[in-house]
């Protein structure tokens, strides 16, 4: 199938061309994101050609100025030649390119994903970015994505429940520390350093979801638990000091 091969190769290189163009365009094109020729023409269409506009419009990418052309390439000012290859149009990615297509802007996530059971089986039935996030209706991600609808396409939810529980324990622990920190802060303690550290930990914890079945996960989780232990130790100290003060006040 030489024609298909050529098409593959062209699309593969287009991804890189488009990246430079795309990263350049984010932010600058926020307003233009909603008025491009891509949107004007596609919004008038129905079915698989029109749906992306309606799904994309309310999602996170639209709100951050990541528009049709930022992902797919092409010329958002042209009409007739908007989708020509010479305008850097990249089309819809083949399944095997989806991860790199998304990963060019979410590089760290891509690296985490590649180490996972899904990354390892990506060409053999493993979940890709769009299996879990969708391609156009993409919102801020939460643990709620781990549900019957998303995961049971490929395996029973019971099978992935232990993984979800593990993540939930970490998320709950962070929330608990956060609540305790707020209480200490109300007592007038300077917790700003701890708040920053916890914030960093919270961001880190969101990476765990991309690592099911990864050896990396165990090492990462250990490092991460150690950091939370340290934060808690300092917090214990603040809390003890607070107890002591309350006791003193009571005795006086
Ligand atoms: C004048 C109308 C028009 C404009 C402007 C237009 N499109 Fe399209 N687009 C179409 C039609 C019709 C199709 C389906 C036929 C085809 O694939 O050529 C299509 C198909 C597509 C596809 C699916 C192609 C595939 O590989 O299956 C994507 C993605 C796409 N357009 C994105 C864009 C982007 C991005 C822009 C702006 C840079 C754009 N379009 C501008 C009419 C338009
Ligand atoms: C965040 C990146 C991203 C943005 C932004 C985006 N798309 Fe897509 N689009 C994709 C991906 C990925 C696919 C392939 C989906 C798949 O195979 O499941 C796709 C597929 C498509 C298709 C083919 C659908 C099909 O079922 O054949 C069309 C048409 C399309 N996009 C048009 C658009 C239009 C129009 C916009 C702007 C409103 C847009 N896209 C914005 C990532 C994006
Ligand atoms: C098996 C399902 C699944 C797959 C596959 C998946 N994700 Fe996620 N993703 C999630 C879940 C669940 C969260 C929410 C994690 C949380 O908030 O704790 C998430 C969070 C995210 C976040 C926000 C968290 C952060 O660290 O910034 C981004 C960005 C993201 N995913 C992009 C991607 C990309 C890009 C791919 C493909 C390389 C991908 N995801 C593949 C389920 C998945
Ligand atoms: C051109 C760059 C670009 C591409 C390509 C791209 N994204 Fe994004 N994505 C962004 C930006 C920018 C944000 C907003 C980041 C922020 O504000 O934290 C974002 C946000 C997200 C979020 C929400 C993160 C969170 O904090 O919860 C998810 C999930 C996500 N993208 C998934 C995807 C998926 C899946 C694809 C492929 C279909 C994709 N992205 C392709 C730039 C991109
Ligand atoms: C498109 C199909 C697909 C989807 C959707 C999918 N997975 Fe998977 N998953 C796989 C494949 C393939 C494997 C590797 C083979 C296996 O272990 O069954 C796997 C393996 C796993 C493993 C096992 C890792 C191990 O070492 O035992 C976990 C955990 C997992 N997935 C979690 C999830 C979660 C959580 C979701 C939903 C957010 C999800 N998967 C959605 C296809 C999918």
Image (cartoon, helix red, strand yellow):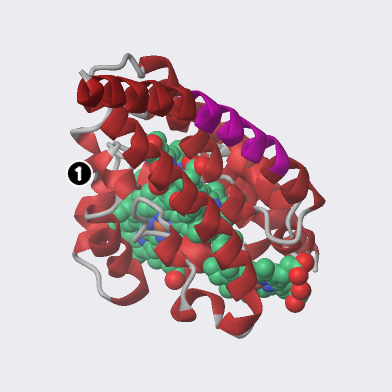
Q: Residue at x 65, y 55 (%)?
A: 97
User: Which structural element holds mark 1?
Assistant: helix
**Can residue 125 be seen in the rendering of this structure?**
no
Q: Which residue is more in the foreground, 10 or 136? A: 136
Q: Residue at x 23, y 17 (%)?
A: 188
Across and down, in percent, residue 165 comes to 56, 66
Is 229 included in the stretch rendered in magenta?
yes
Q: Which residue is more in the foreground, 240 or 112? A: 240
Q: Which residue reaches farthest front? A: 251
Identify the main secondary structure in magenta.
helix
Label 1 packing within 10 angstroms: few (<14), some (14-19), many (20+): some
Q: Residue at x 63, y 37 (%)?
A: 224
Q: Quadrant of ligand 5?
A: bottom right
Q: Quadrant of residue 77?
A: top left
| Range drawn in magenta | 222-234
116 relative to 151, above or below: above
Tally of numbered tags: 1
Is 148 included in the stretch rendered in magenta?
no
97 relative to 152, above or below: above
Q: Which residue is more in the foreground, 129 or 79? A: 129
**Can residue 109 be seen in the rendering of this structure?**
yes
Quarter occupied by the N terminus: bottom right
Across and down, in percent, residue 196 comes to 42, 22
201 relative to 197, above or below: below
Quarter occupied by the C terminus: top left
Residue marked by disc 1: 34
Across and down, in percent, residue 32 comes to 21, 35
124 relative to 184, above or below: below
Q: Residue at x 42, y 16 (%)?
A: 193
Q: Describe residue 127's horizontal placement relative to residue 250 as left or right.
A: right
């Amino acid at each position: 199938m030489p024609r298909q091969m050529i098409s593959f190769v062209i699309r593969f290189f287009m991804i890189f061309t488009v990246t430079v163009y795309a990263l350049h365009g984010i932010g600058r094109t926020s307003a233009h994101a909603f008025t491009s020729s891509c949107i004007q023409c596609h919004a008038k269409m129905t079915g698989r050609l029109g749906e992306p506009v309606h799904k994309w419009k309310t999602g996170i990418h639209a709100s951050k100025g990541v528009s049709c052309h930022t992902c797919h390439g092409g010329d958002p000012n042209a009409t007739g030649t908007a989708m020509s290859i010479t305008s850097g149009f990249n089309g819809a990615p083949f399944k095997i390119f989806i991860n790199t297509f998304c990963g060019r802007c979410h590089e760290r996530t891509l690296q985490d994903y590649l180490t996972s059971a899904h990354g390892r089986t990506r060409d053999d039935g493993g979940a890709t970015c769009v299996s879990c996030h969708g391609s156009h209706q993409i919102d801020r991600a939460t643990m709620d994505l781990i549900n019957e609808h998303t995961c049971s396409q490929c395996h029973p939810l019971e099978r992935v429940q232990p993984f979800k529980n593990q993540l939930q324990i970490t998320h709950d622990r962070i929330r608990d520390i956060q609540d305790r920190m707020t209480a200490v802060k109300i007592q007038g303690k300077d917790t700003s350093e701890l708040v920053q550290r916890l914030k960093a930990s919270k961001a880190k914890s969101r990476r765990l979801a991309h690592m099911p079945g990864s050896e990396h996960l165990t090492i990462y989780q250990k490092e991460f638990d150690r950091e939370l232990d340290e934060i808690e130790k300092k917090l214990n100290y603040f809390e003890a000091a607070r107890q002591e003060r309350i006791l003193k006040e009571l005795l006086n």
